[in-house]
Structures are given as C-alpha cells and as structure tokens.
Amino acid sequence: KAGVTQTPRYLIKTRGQQVTLSCSPISGHRSVSWYQQTPGQGLQFLFEYFSETQRNKGNFPGRFSGRQFSNSRSEMNVSTLELGDSALYLCASSLTDRGRFTDTQYFGPGTRLTVL
Amino acid sequence: AQKITQTQPGMFVQEKEAVTLDCTYDTSDPSYGLFWYKQPSSGEMIFLIYQGSYDQQNATEGRYSLNFQKARKSANLVISASQLGDSAMYFCAMRGNQGGKLIFGQGTELSVKP
C-alpha cells in the first residue's frame, strides 16, 4: 500500500507570495493533519480534516488555511508569505474519524518551503 | 495542557549496543496514547511504536521497545542492537482524546558509531 504523498517536495517563494501544498493520504485513510516543523519552534500542529471538514485548528494566523476534498486529498494554503514561514510542512493521515488517542498518524515526506 | 519533554538533545551509541531515549510527559487526560517517531535527514517522520495509557504491558516492535512507567509519566524508547541506519532524530509524541493533534517533544538526535 502506498504511503502518504506530498507535492511538491521543495518550494522556493518570495515574501508576499502565496503557496499551495498538496497531500494524498494512505488509501482508505480519511483523516488528514498538517504540521509545521522549524528549528526554533519544533513540530507544531496546523489543522486536521475529516470528511472535508476542519475538526481542529492550531494556533496559526488566518494566512494559513486548508481544505479536504471528497477523495480525502488535502491542500494547505499560505497567503502573503513571510520569512518565518520557511519550514518543513508535514502531512499525516490516520484511519478513523474519531480522533481517538489510539489512532496512529502516518506521515508523508514533507514539503520544504523556503521563503526569500 | 499537554507537554512532552525530551531532555537529551543528542546521544551517541556504539553499533550493536542498546540505547535508551528518554521521554516524560504531562497530561490531565485519563486516556492518551504515546508514540515514537524517527526522522532521518530526509525529513520523513517514520512511526516506530505506540503505547496506550491503559496498556498493561510495555509495547515492543522488533528492535524497539517502550519502557512505560505511568506513575512516573515516562515513556522511554529502547533500541536494541543499534545499527548505523538508526542515526536520526527521534521524537516522542502524545495524543489525548481532546482532539486529533499530536504533541511532540523537541527530539533527540541519535548518532550510531561504527
């Protein structure tokens, strides 16, 4: 079974631009979560989607948004990019919809975003 | 609030030896899950092992085992017979029943020496 895929793997943008990252979950997984990883802040939760609905959101400004499609694929968008948005963005999928503590999240390879 | 603490920023281990990576956690949730992930330099987070708060026995997955001490709120990862390919960042994470997000520690960088 194929794992979580993320595209693109690398991206370079300039300040003020916007960017869209894509994530395809493991087949059959319906929940998708996004995380931002930076050297200073570590891994931080962005948001979680299930059945095209955002179930949880982390403490990020409104410039960060996301959505999920009917086939469970998800996209996240960052508008008006800032230098501090440079990070590794990781997508994770899990099997169930309940968000229970037993659900394991499986991660993709990440998209490394550089903002110049 | 939930919190994960990994106090070892970096560790060295000789190939074929065992190593323990420390993780302590704090939560008020009665039910929670503890996870360990490995992140090689390529960036992908690889799931290693899971321990549920109600599990009576320590989890094991091949060369990985989790030393779970609930009263001390610790969930240390033990890697037996270290291999060169084990060199990576290791993250301890926790998930409660309050939502889907994982709370991560700051990670431990493990270097395996030949």
Image (cartoon, rainbow, N blue to C red):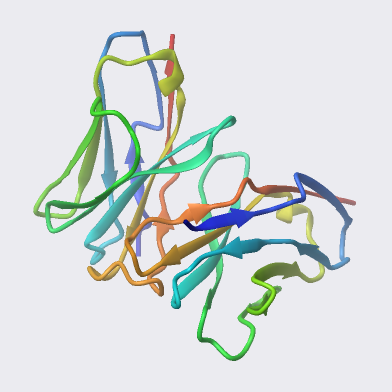
Whether residue A74 sits left or right of residue B50 in the image: it is: left
Count of residue discs: 0
Q: Is residue B76 above or below residue B68?
A: above
Q: Is residue A71 above or below residue A95?
A: above
Q: Residue at x 57, y 63 (%)?
A: B26
Q: Residue at x 22, y 68 (%)?
A: A97
User: In the rendered view, would you say B111 is above or below A42?
Assistant: below
Residue A18: x, y in percent? 25, 17
- Name which residue lies at 90% across and 51% down: B114
In this rendering, position of residue B96 left or right of residue A95:
right
Residue B87 position in % (x across, y down): 74, 50
Tell me which corner region of the image, top left, top right, bottom left or bottom right, holds residue A78. top left
Q: Residue furthest bottom?
A: B56
The answer to which image quadrant residue A22 occupies is top left
Q: Position of residue B40 (x, y in %)?
A: 62, 46
* Residue closest to the eye, B10 or A25: B10
Tell which residue pokes out farthest to the left in this image.
A70
Residue B76 relative to residue B20: left or right = left
Image: B101 above or below B29: above
Percent position (x, y) of residue B99?
Answer: 32, 61
| Residue drawn at (41%, 75%) of the image | A102
The residue closer to the viewer here, B25 or B13, is B25
